[in-house]
Image (tube, rainbow, N blue to C red):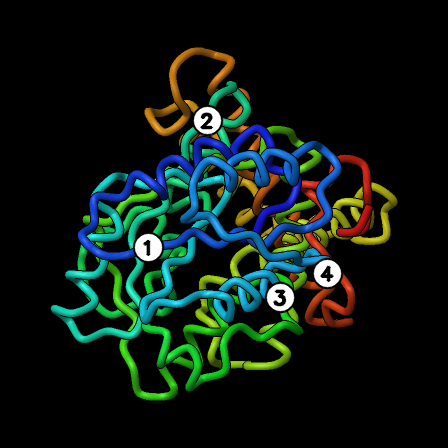
Amino acid sequence: MPVLNERAYLRRAVETVLAQDIDAPTELILALGPSNDGTTELAHELARGDTRIVLVDNPAADIPVGLNLAIRAGRYPTVVRVDAHSELDRSYARSALQTLDRVRAANVGGVMHADGRTPFQRAVARAYNSPIGLGGGAYHGGTQEGEAESAYLGVMRRDVLEEVGLFDESIRRGEDWELNLRIRRAGYRVWFDPSLSVTYWPRESWTRLVRQFAATGRWRGELVRRFGRGNSLRFFAPPALVLTILLALVVAVLQLTGVLTGWWSVAASLVYVPVIAYAVLILAVALGAGGGHGWRDKLWSAAVLPTMHLSWGWGFLGGVIGGARDTVDTSRLGSRNTPLP
């Protein structure tokens, strides 16, 4: 479990891991980044209360670095990736191990079931759980078991991880997708099992959501630069939306200033059609059952969906054009723009 500034969530996350109903020796390794909210002190308190908790320092604060440090510190042949913002059902590890053996996979993952504690966070959770929100990836609500492109978190065979080289520490976001790409290219299975469900608590504020999705989109653009056609077509929908909106704005300015007139103006107006269709889709989702209950829920849903799409798409374009460079996800870091204090 890579950990950075997670005091509000860490205790419950650790409790659900240690409560796993599994007849096997276990350990929980926390890779501690340089938190400034009391998380490190809480982690040491938890470790003093249970000898199964092992602490390793992750001064770089990067997730793939922390994951590799934790994996190398581990003793057992199966690696279960967990998250400080997640909660596991008691049967999660046992069921995942059974699936891992049954289908002879190298990595097994289940459904990310997002949930929220505030109206805003619940709106983000609904977007996560909707195919409109995050593009219909299997672990965002799939129901059909089978081979998958990637796995949420993942229950992995250590020998396969060591064979393919663990997580790529040069990738700060999307590191799980890239690892699973190498696993599949090495001839092993990545498997989705919808009976496995993990509760995930998304970002709690609009600014943090924007920072998260902009950074994630930027790194997806970097992964497109590196792996090209290995990326799913669904990743290109948000940047296409951003480009369409920008083009519509240019056309609107040209029409209002009289530069574009006559039949050329009529033809150019076709660019408004997909923008209007998108707006109608967002309103339909927000006003429908997927928008929650009550006007506040529906307003937040109408705001959250385009926030996620546009910030991700804008970040993607930046990543494709200029690469991700040193982009980090600062959404867990308050007002800081660096992973270090």
- Measured along the vertical axis of the image, is residue 307 above or below residue 143? above
**How many residues crowd mark 4 within 10 Å: few (<14), some (14–19), many (20+)?**
some
Q: Which residue is mark 1?
A: 26
Measured in 3D between alpha carbons, the distance from the residue under mark 1 to the one under mark 3, in whole angstroms, is 22 Å
- Local secondary structure at mark 3: helix
> Mark 2 touching mark 3, by CB under 8 A?
no
Residue 240 in the image, given as x and y percentages of width and height: 59, 59
Q: Earlier in the sequence, mark 4 or mark 2?
A: 4
Disc 3 residue type (three-letter) = Val
Q: Earlier in the sequence, mark 2 or mark 1?
A: 1
Q: Is residue 116 visible?
A: yes
Disc 2 residue type (three-letter) = Gly
- Local secondary structure at mark 1: loop
Q: Which residue is mark 2?
A: 116
User: Which of the labelled discs sits on residue 65, or is there none?
Assistant: 3
Disc 1 residue type (three-letter) = Thr
Q: Which residue is mark 4?
A: 60
Residue 325 in the image, given as x and y percentages of width and height: 77, 69
Q: Residue at x 51, y 71 (%)?
A: 72
Residue 211 in the image, given as x and y percentages of width and height: 70, 44
Q: Residue at x 15, y 71 (%)?
A: 103
- Local secondary structure at mark 4: loop
Q: Is residue 278 left or right of residue 25?
A: right
Quarter of the image where the C terminus is located: top right
Q: Relative to the observer, which residue lies in front, 313 or 89?
A: 89
Q: Earlier in the sequence, mark 2 or mark 3?
A: 3
